[in-house]
Image: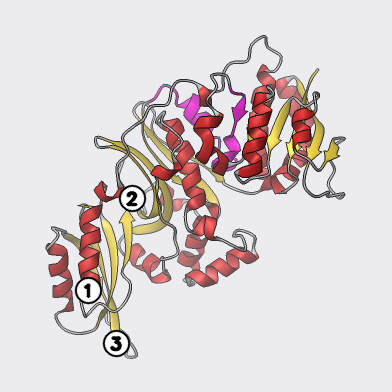
């Protein structure tokens, strides 16, 4: 049996998951591929004597992985953009295959790292954990023209919105709970501000639409403005609130945006809860396909890392390894649609004084910008309240018109707080 010798950069949760899977399922992988995976070297800033390195040599310098002639594949599992990018570049220059779970480095530098026509770099684990979405886009749906990609691609946001819905808790309460359970970091901004999801959508858009890895082209919004009452009002209107990444090809160009969205309860994405991820791809021949599964965690991400390693194993001993699907073809510069030009229906929660004539003022401000009202919720305030929320669901309207209307609404004397705007997810 042939052997594929692995070097691992990092010794965190994902790296430990890789070691555990090789220890427990290595024989199964060998039977399936005819290749025995072997740990040659592990490099990390800190030693962890309690972790079984499966015979691998330990080093404090990740560049030792590149220098070691016995390392066939390097797993970049340290994260970030600085040292990780440097390691990937030097490994590729040395002719070593690389597998990474690093969505940030691919989103920011994917074009550069994949510039070679035969770059042995794979990154299935960078998007949606154990879900084989990159393989599906590159192979399973290769015969299709992709029309849109919708994703719940951040487990922290999905967990928080699910708990807010099920338990009626405030945002800050749920965030503290998520941090206590390890679903959110001590500094949760990367997740709750939408940056993590935007990195992943950058990759999905590049692969799905054969365009560049352009993180700067995305509109990015997190979930910090969502309140428990928004989730309750959304339910009354027939929606659930999900944090989505949306890449959508239209006559005007490619929309790439990350933000909370109202998803009709009848849609498959509305039923994806907790820390689960899901990606829905709409294509011309296959129609709507939904991929769902664990989007984070050591074991799930390690599964995706080893899926890429085993892809290398299948071709490792052939005369010529084919180019990975990620590097085939030439990226095209598709016109990106500015967020101001994107039309959508909108949910508006407007805190106002409880006095006669206020709704007429609100309706007049919307009408001035040609915004039609589809539905309204206005409830009586409790005896202790002097204000009440007017909740409006608009018809389709371009973003710039909503922005102008929100500015006018905020200037009304009867509006006494920040207005919450949540877009309705587009139909397929």
Work out whether residue 269 or residue 15 is closer to the camera in this orientation and state it: 15
- Count neighbours of disc 1 (C-alpha within 10 A) and say few if under 14, some if 14 to 19, many if 20 or more: few
Q: Quadrant of the N terminus?
A: top right
Which residues are drawn in magenta? 119-144
| Quarter of the figure with residue 286 | top left
Q: Is residue 277 above or below residue 402?
A: above
Q: Earlier in the sequence, mark 2 or mark 1?
A: 1
Coloration of the structure image: secondary structure
Q: Which residue is mark 3?
A: 386
Q: Disc 1 vs disc 3: Cβ atoms closer than 8 Å?
A: no
Q: Give percent across and percent down for residue 228.
A: 42, 70
Of pointers 1 and 3, the one earlier in the residue sequence: 3
State which quarter of the image contains the C terminus. top left
Disc marking residue 411: 1
Instruction: Please tell me whether mark 1 or mark 3 is closer to you in this view.
Output: 1
Secondary structure category for the residue under label 1: loop
Q: Is residue 49 above or below residue 202?
A: below
Of all residues shown, which one is farthest toward the bottom?
383
- Where residue 177 appears, as percent x and y from the top left, is 59, 68
Q: CA distance from mark 1 to mark 3?
A: 19 Å
Task: Select label 2 or label 1 by which is in front.
Answer: 1
What distance separates the C-alpha of mark 2 from that of mark 1?
28 Å
Asked if the stretch drawn in magenta spans residue 130, the answer is yes
Secondary structure beneath dot 2 equals: loop
Quote the CA–CA distance across marks 3 and 2: 33 Å
Indicate the position of residue 50 as horizontal and vertical percent values: 86, 50
Number of the label disc, if any, that sits on residue 425:
2
Asked whether 161 falls inside the magenta stretch, the response is: no
Callout 3 secondary element: loop
Q: Is residue 416 above or below residue 305?
A: below
């Amino acid at each position: 049996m042939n052997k594929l010798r692995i070097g691992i950069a990092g010794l965190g949760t994902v790296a430990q998951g890789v070691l555990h899977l090789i220890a427990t399922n290595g024989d199964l992988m060998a039977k399936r591929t005819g290749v025995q995976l072997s740990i040659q070297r592990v490099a990390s800033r800190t030693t962890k004597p309690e972790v079984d390195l499966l015979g691998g040599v330990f080093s404090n310098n990740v560049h030792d992985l590149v220098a070691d002639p016995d390392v066939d594949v390097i797993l970049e599992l340290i994260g970030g953009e600085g040292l990780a990018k440097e390691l990937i570049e030097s490994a590729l220059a040395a002719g070593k295959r690389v597998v990474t779970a690093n969505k940030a480095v691919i989103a920011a530098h994917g074009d550069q790292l994949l510039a070679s026509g035969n770059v042995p770099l794979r990154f299935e684990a960078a998007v949606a954990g154990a879900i084989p979405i990159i393989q599906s886009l590159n192979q399973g749906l290769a015969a299709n023209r992709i029309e849109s990609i919708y994703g719940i691609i951040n487990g922290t946001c999905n967990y928080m919105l699910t708990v807010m819905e099920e338990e009626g808790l405030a945002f800050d309460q749920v965030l503290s709970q998520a941090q206590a359970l390890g679903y959110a970091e001590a500094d949760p901004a990367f997740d709750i501000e939408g940056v993590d999801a935007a990195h992943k959508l950058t990759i999905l858009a590049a692969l799905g639409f054969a365009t560049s890895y352009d993180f700067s082209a995305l509109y990015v919004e997190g979930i910090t403005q969502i309140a428990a009452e928004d989730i309750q009002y959304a339910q009354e209107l027939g929606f659930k609130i999900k944090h989505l990444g949306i890449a959508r090809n239209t006559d005007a160009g490619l929309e790439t945006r990350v933000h909370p969205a109202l998803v009709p309860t009848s849609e498959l994405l509305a039923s994806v809860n907790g820390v689960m991820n899901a990606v829905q791809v709409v294509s011309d021949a296959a129609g709507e396909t939904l991929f769902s599964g664990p989007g984070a965690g050591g074991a799930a991400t390690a599964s995706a890392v080893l899926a890429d390693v085993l892809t290398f194993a299948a071709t490792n001993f052939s005369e010529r390894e084919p180019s990975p699907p990620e590097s085939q073809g030439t990226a095209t510069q598709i016109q990106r649609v500015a967020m101001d030009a994107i039309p959508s229906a909108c949910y508006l929660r407007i805190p106002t004084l409880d006095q006669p004539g206020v709704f007429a003022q609100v309706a007049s401000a919307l009408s001035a910008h040609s915004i039609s009202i589809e539905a309204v919720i206005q409830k009586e305030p409790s005896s202790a309240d002097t204000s009440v929320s007017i909740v409006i669901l608009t018809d389709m309207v371009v973003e710039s018109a909503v922005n102008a209307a929100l500015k006018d609404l905020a200037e009304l004397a009867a509006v006494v707080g920040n207005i919450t705007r949540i877009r309705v997810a587009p139909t397929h």
